[in-house]
Amino acid sequence: MSRSETPDVAAVQAFLLDFQGRACRALEEEDGAACFREDLFAGEGGALARPRVLADGAVIERAAVNFSHAAGRELPGAASARRPEITGATYGAVSVSMIVHPRNPYAPTSHANFRLFVAHRDGGEPVWWFGGGFDLTPYYGFEEDAVEWHEMAKAACDPFGAGLYAEYKKACDEYFYLEHREEPRGIGGLFFDDLSDGGFARCFRFVRGAADRYLAAYRAILARRKLLPYGERERSFQLLRRGRYVEFNLLYDRGTRFGLQSGARVESILAALPPLVAWRYDWQPEPGTPEAELYEKFLRPRDWIGARS
Amino acid sequence: MSRSETPDVAAVQAFLLDFQGRACRALEEEDGAACFREDLFAGEGGALARPRVLADGAVIERAAVNFSHAAGRELPGAASARRPEITGATYGAVSVSMIVHPRNPYAPTSHANFRLFVAHRDGGEPVWWFGGGFDLTPYYGFEEDAVEWHEMAKAACDPFGAGLYAEYKKACDEYFYLEHREEPRGIGGLFFDDLSDGGFARCFRFVRGAADRYLAAYRAILARRKLLPYGERERSFQLLRRGRYVEFNLLYDRGTRFGLQSGARVESILAALPPLVAWRYDWQPEPGTPEAELYEKFLRPRDWIGARS
C-alpha cells in the first residue's frame, strides 16, 4: 500500500469525462431517438458538475450519467463515518455515476459509479482512494445475461489479484441489499471502496478497465433485450420492482445521502430515480411464474461463474 | 407535569381501535366502491398489529389506516435518540397512523398519527408520553381548505392552552420539511411529541379531540374535491408531487425509520407510500400556472388563521 503516492486527479477527471461522453453516445445509439440533455455547473475551488440526463427515449425511459468534481471545506458525515481520522479535512472528489432505466421490462436497470477521493489534512500528505463498482437489476431473469455480466466482472478483476472478484462481488451483494425486505437489489456485480493497494497507477488501471468492460457488457445486454415483446403484466411488475430501487436509494445508498448532505444539486442526485414507480400492498408473485422465478433464482447471492451449462 | 401518573394504556388502545374503525368507515363511505382489507398479526407480550388498506377505490387510490400495539425488549435508536436515559428500556406503544392518497389531484393527501409510548426501566416508574398530529398535502391549493384545516387544528388546541396551536403548528412545519429541496411537504397542521404536561387524563382528552376533529375536517375536504373534473396535466403533476411524499417518508420520517428498525412488518409501514409515483428531471412549474401557485402560496409556512377574507 502506498497512500503517499500523489494521485493524478487531472488524469482521472479526464478519463471520467471521456467515459461519460462514450457512455452517453452508446446509450443514444441504443435508443435511436432521444438525446442527452447536458447541464453544467461550476462552483468554488474548481468544483464542476456536468449532469447528463436522457428522458422519455424509445428504448431508455430515463438515464442519468453524471460527472462531478466536488470540493469542500469539510467532509460530510456520510463520507467520514468510517474514517474518523479525516473528519473535518478538506477534500476533493471526481466521480461519474450512471443509472439506466430502460423502458422494456426485459431489459435490466444498471448502475455504475467510479470515483477518486482525496482528503487533505493540515500539514499531512493527501489521503486518497478509489471507490465504485457496478451492478445489474433485472426485472425478469436471464441466466445468460447474469453469467455474462459476472464473467465480465471477473475478467476486470483477475489481472489484479486472484481473490479480487470474489471479494468485490461479495461486497456488492452486501451493499446492494434491502435489509428491511431481506432482499438483494439485483444480481450484483462489483463493489469496491478504499482502494489504494498497489499505488495510484495500478488502481487507476483497474478502474479504467472496470469502467470500459461495464459499458460494453451492459450495452450488449440492453441491445439483446430492448425489443422483446411485453405487455401490461410485465410493465406492471417492472414498476413495482422499481419501487425497490427507490427504497434502496433513499433509505440506504451512501452516495445519495452524501450528495444530499453535501448540498450537491438535488436534481442531479435524484435524476437516478426511475421515472414511473408503483407500490402495491402486500403483493406476492404466484408460484411458478416468471415473476416468482426472479425472486427464487436471481434475487439471491449466487455463484454465477460456472453456472453456464 | 406528572409523568408518574400511570397511563391507562387499555383505554388509549380502545380509543385508537375505535378511531381506526370510524376512519375506515368514513373513507369507505366517501369512496362508495372499495372496502378496506384487514390483516391481523399477534406477537409476543400482547403485541398486535391491525393494518387496514384500501386499494384502487373510485375516490381513494390508496389508504392505509394502521393500528399497532408494539412491545419490545429494547427501544430502537430512532425512538431513544433524544432520550438517552431510556436507552435499553423495555417499551410498549399503541398507535394509529393513517395516510390517504385520493385519486383526484384536487383532493389533498392527508396523514395523521396518534400514539402513546410507555417505557419501563428497571425499578423505576414508567415514563410515558403521547405523540402525533396531522398534516395536509394538497396538489392544488384551495385557500378555503387551508383555512378550514388550520381553524380545526386551532380549535383542537385552544381548550388546552393559548399558545398551543402556534407551538404545534410550528413543530409541524419544521418536521414535515424536505431539507434537500428546502420545501415543506404540504400546508402542515399539528405535530406534538413528548406530551405529558398536565397528566394523563388531560393529555388523552387532547388527543381524542384532535383525532376526531382531524377525521371530520379531512372528510369534508375530500367530499368537496373528490369529483372535480381533471385531466392528464393535473394527474401528471399529482404523480410528480407524490414523489416528494416518498422522498420525505424514506429520507426523513422517524415513524418509517422506527418501524423498519424495530422489525415491524414492512408491508404495513410502506403501505403509506402512494400507489403510483413519477420523478421528472429538473421540472419547474411555469409562472402563473396553478402548479406554480402551489409553490408560491401554499408550500411555505403561513399564518392561515385570519387569512380568510
Image (cartoon, coloured by chain):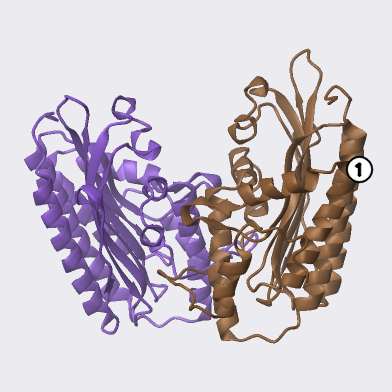
Chain colours: A purple, B brown
Q: Residue at x 76, y 36 (%)?
A: B93
Q: Residue at x 88, y 42 (%)?
A: B160
**Can residue A122 be seen in this snapshot?**
yes
Against B11, residue B303 (above or below) is below
Residue placed under numbered mark 1 in the picture: B205
Q: Residue B4 at what x, y percent from top left?
A: 85, 22
Using the image as rendered, state which of residue A114 and residue B229 is in the foreground: B229
Chain of the residue under the numbered disc 1 shown in the image: B
Q: Residue at x 87, y 48 (%)?
A: B158
Lateral position of residue A44 relative to residue A180, left or right: left
Q: Residues within 10 Å of mark 1 (few under 14, many from 20)?
A: few
Against A143, residue A105 (above or below) is below
Lateral position of residue B218 relative to residue B209, left or right: left
Lateral position of residue B257 relative to residue A156, left or right: right
Using the image as rendered, state which of residue B119 and residue B288 is in the foreground: B288
Q: Residue B230 at what x, y percent from top left?
A: 65, 85
